[in-house]
């Protein structure tokens, strides 16, 4: 049967009505919901997902006896590497080309990953995301500036009259484009700005240098990379409005957003999130964020390790929601690449290696103003075609002027903190 184009919007509306209510559930009601959905998902996975069917049998885990949250730590964590190498086994035996959507992500990590979901998961994601944006003062069709990667052909920004949105292409961020955008926003101010924090900050700085002052919006919603305390302060300095941070991932395993009171909440009616120590055991302090989306039956990712760390808060929020709070999300802010044609690419570089087959990890190092070195760790399925795909993804962002070299390595360059960031800039730039 042909799918109606109204199907997804209707599902989103249905989930929107749900999420409007569920945000004010008390702890007891929330726990009942979480336990029921986890039980249902885990029993389904035991029956229909080869990876879990086999793994549960191997470790002697009885899905029928699983009680919910209290039994979660009997299931081993799932890491990105397993999803990358065994995605076929993680697919439900009921999945087929008609009922799943393939998605891919490398986020800002440089590790490409493919996974499946369906429109029910997408509807949940959109509805939960919109609710988070509503917490931050966003309203549908309220004049908004969106700053992210669009790949416009001939322009740096476009106005969408229907949604009342100006979309700025962060691939074209430069002094000139920021100034032209500022002129447009001064002419007709926006109420909300949504997008990459680095780009939103640089727009204001560039505009100011060019003698243009951005009118303050009512709020800014940032996503796509870690928002540090310093960057948040700088954004407040430039824009003089509250900043709301939003954390989510393509895999839909976790979501964190700031409420009206400014607290970061785990979005617990969207995914079940755990904070675990190095041994995979739940901790009440700082630990790794592990998540299980309730709604993805096509490729259930159970106890998926996001590799991002958070600090659980001990204080309850006064907003009336029972969702647990975190004090901080740890991670590194994106470094940026300065192209030789004067553009500056930060979080926009995320996802540039999504489609490359056989790439386990990658890292872009700008070692000269006109040169980018791409280090990659590969497996046996990597071939010339993979390199072409990589090159296309990167060229789309950096343009044609910079020289691009690939180097297959066994290990990536690490920072003092032991992390191997996706972007490393070795050139000194007066702007930062
Ligand atoms: Zn709150």
Image (cartoon, grey):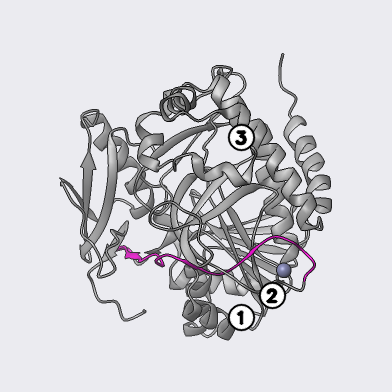
Choose between 77 and 147: the one closer to the eye. Answer: 77
Question: Looking at the image, which residue is at 52% across and 42% down?
Answer: 251
Q: In the shown orientation, is residue 256 left or right of residue 27?
A: left
Residue 246 position, x and y percent, is: 59, 61
Find the magenta span and give its range: 319-341
Are dots 2 and 3 in contact, CB under 8 Å? no
Q: Is residue 337 magenta?
A: yes
Q: Quadrant of the C terminus?
A: bottom left
Would you identify the image quadrant in which residue 257 lies? bottom right
- How many angstroms separate mark 2 from mark 1 (CA)? 7 Å
In the rendered image, which residue does mark 1 sit on? 239
Q: Residue at x 74, y 53 (%)?
A: 163
**Horizontal and vertical percent for residue 380?**
20, 29
Dividing the picture into quarters, in which one does residue 378 lie? top left
- Circle 2 is placed at which residue position? 217
Q: Nearer the viewer, mark 3 or mark 1?
A: 3
The relative height of residue 171 versus residue 178 in the rendered view (above or below) is: above
Sequence order check: which comes first, mark 2 or mark 3? 3
Q: Is residue 74 visible?
A: yes
Q: Is residue 232 above or below residue 103?
A: below
């Amino acid at each position: 049967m042909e799918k109606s184009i109204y199907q997804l919007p209707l599902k989103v509306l249905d989930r929107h009505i749900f999420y409007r209510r569920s945000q004010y559930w008390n702890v007891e009601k929330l726990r009942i919901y979480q336990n029921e959905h986890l039980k249902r998902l885990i029993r389904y996975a035991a029956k229909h997902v080869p990876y879990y069917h086999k793994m549960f049998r191997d470790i002697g885990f009885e899905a029928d006896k699983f009680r919910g949250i209290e039994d979660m730590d009997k299931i081993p964590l799932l890491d990105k590497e397993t999803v990358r190498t065994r995605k076929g086994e993680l697919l439900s035996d009921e999945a087929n080309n008609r009922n799943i959507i393939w998605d891919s992500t490398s986020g800002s990590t440089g590790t490409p990953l493919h996974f499946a979901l369906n429109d029910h998961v997408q509807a949940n994601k959109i509805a939960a995301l919109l609710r988070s944006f509503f917490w931050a003062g966003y309203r549908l069709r309220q004049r908004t500036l969106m700053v992210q990667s669009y790949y416009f052909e001939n322009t740096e920004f476009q106005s969408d009259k229907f949604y009342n949105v100006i979309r700025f292409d962060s691939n074209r961020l430069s002094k000139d484009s920021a100034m032209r955008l500022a002129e447009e926003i001064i002419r007709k101010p926006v109420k909300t700005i949504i997008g990459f924090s680095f780009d939103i900050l640089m727009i204001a700085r560039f505009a100011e240098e060019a003698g243009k002052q951005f009118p303050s919006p009512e709020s800014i919603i940032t996503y796509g990379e870690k928002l540090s305390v310093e960057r948040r302060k700088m954004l407040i300095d430039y824009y003089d409005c509250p900043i709301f941070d939003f954390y989510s991932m393509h895999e839909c395993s976790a979501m964190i957003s700031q409420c009206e009171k400014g607290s970061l909440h785990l979005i617990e009616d969207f995914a079940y999130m755990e904070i675990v120590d190095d041994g995979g055991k739940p901790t009440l302090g700082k630990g790794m964020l592990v998540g299980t989306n309730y709604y993805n039956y096509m490729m259930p990712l159970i106890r998926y390790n996001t590799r991002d760390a958070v600090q659980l808060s001990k204080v309850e929020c006064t907003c009336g929601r029972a969702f647990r709070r975190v004090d901080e999300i740890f991670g590194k802010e994106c470094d940026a690449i300065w192209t030789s044609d004067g553009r500056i690419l930060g979080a926009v570089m995320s996802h540039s290696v999504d489609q490359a087959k056989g790439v386990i990890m990658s890292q872009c190092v700008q070692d000269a103003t006109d040169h980018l070195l791409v280090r990659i760790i590969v497996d046996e399925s990597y071939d010339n075609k993979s390199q072409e795909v990589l090159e296309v993804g990167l060229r789309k962002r950096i343009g044609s002027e910079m020289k691009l070299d690939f180097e297959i390595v066994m290990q990536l360059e690490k920072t003092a903190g032991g992390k191997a960031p996706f972007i490393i800039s070795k050139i000194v730039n007066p702007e930062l």
